[in-house]
Image (tube, rainbow, N blue to C red):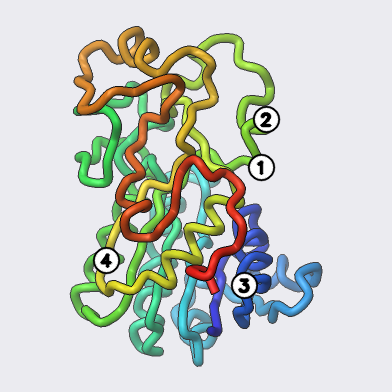
Amino acid sequence: MRVVVTGAAGSLGRRVVARALLAGHEVVATDLPSVTATADDEAGAIWLGADLTVLEDARRLLAGAAAVVHLAGLTSPRAAEEPEVHRTNVGVTYNVLLAAEERGVAAVCTASSVNAIGGFYSARPHYDYFPLDEVHPSYCEDAYSLSKWVGEQQSAAFARRRPEAVFAALRLHALREDITDAVHPPDTGPEKRLRDLWGWTSFDAAAAAVLRALRRPDPGHAVYNIVAARTTCEIPSSELARRFHPEVPLRCPLPGNAGFYDTTRAAAELGWHAHDEHPAISAAER
């Protein structure tokens, strides 16, 4: 199928483009014109420059597309002034969703973040229970995290308008090549990564989740935690929870270095498994 990937020149975007090509899809890769002018290293992809803050650019890109993977946007609250971070991320997501609706795009996958409920960028993250699932309330504080939460609501709203289409928002976390990269430089103590609950996601696993989301057989909107099954910390997770979040109840045990994010929904609905950090391309992605 013809897949449009926005933010295609980014670290995850390039992995998604490459994996989609290997899976046999026709790929239109898009990023800002200044970036795509020199982006030619993924043989087979069609690279097009676009400014997705402009609705007409989004409409042009999605003509003839069967699916869109929306990864474009500012990636932290420090990437620009707060109003610009929020305005950019919310605005481009709306433009992509509207253009997808107008063009009849059947599957839409957007990049959200575990920070949609609050976390790394919060002064003191607040959690109601562990492990965290997709229905946990949001206590986000900053412009970036808020924009990710709003993006999920936008996806749900467009899904209500188009109940026949597939919409998926993937909550990604601290993307890295592998576990070695995730723990480098070495921790000086568990406090260093307290605010992100020692979580991470490999690029390979994230890209696999994207393609699986596009091929999900059931229509409608869903949010998925896409986070590795193990933390980056050698200290047992149950001890981390007792030491740093004694007020947070455990809904189920956290054996060994089990992650603090519940990924059972992604396993059940997408066939994506958090323990497989470098999954081979599957039939579900083709």
Q: Taking 283 as reference, is 143 above or below it?
A: above
Which residue is drawn at the image coordinates 24% and 65% (left, top)? 156
Residue 233: x and y in percent read 52, 19
Image quarter of the C terminus? bottom right
- Lower position in the chain sequence, tag 1 or tag 3: 3
Residue of label 4 = 221
Q: Which amino acid does label 2 sit on?
A: Thr
Q: Is residue 119 visible?
A: yes
Q: Are marks 1 and 2 in contact (CB under 8 Å)?
A: yes
- Lower position in the chain sequence, tag 2 or tag 4: 2
Residue of label 3 = 23
Q: Which amino acid does label 4 sit on?
A: His
Is 197 left or right of 277, judged from the image as shown? left
Q: Taking 143 as reference, is 88 above or below it?
A: below
Q: Is mark 3 on a helix, strand or loop?
A: loop
Separation of marks 1 and 2 at Cα, in angstroms: 8 Å
Separation of marks 2 and 4 at Cα, in angstroms: 34 Å
Q: Can residue 78 be seen in this view?
A: no
Q: Which amino acid does label 3 sit on?
A: Ala
Residue neighbourhood size for the residue with mark 1, other residues' Cα within 10 Å, grouped as few (<14), some (14–19), many (≥20): some
Residue of label 1 = 177
Separation of marks 1 and 3 at Cα, in angstroms: 20 Å
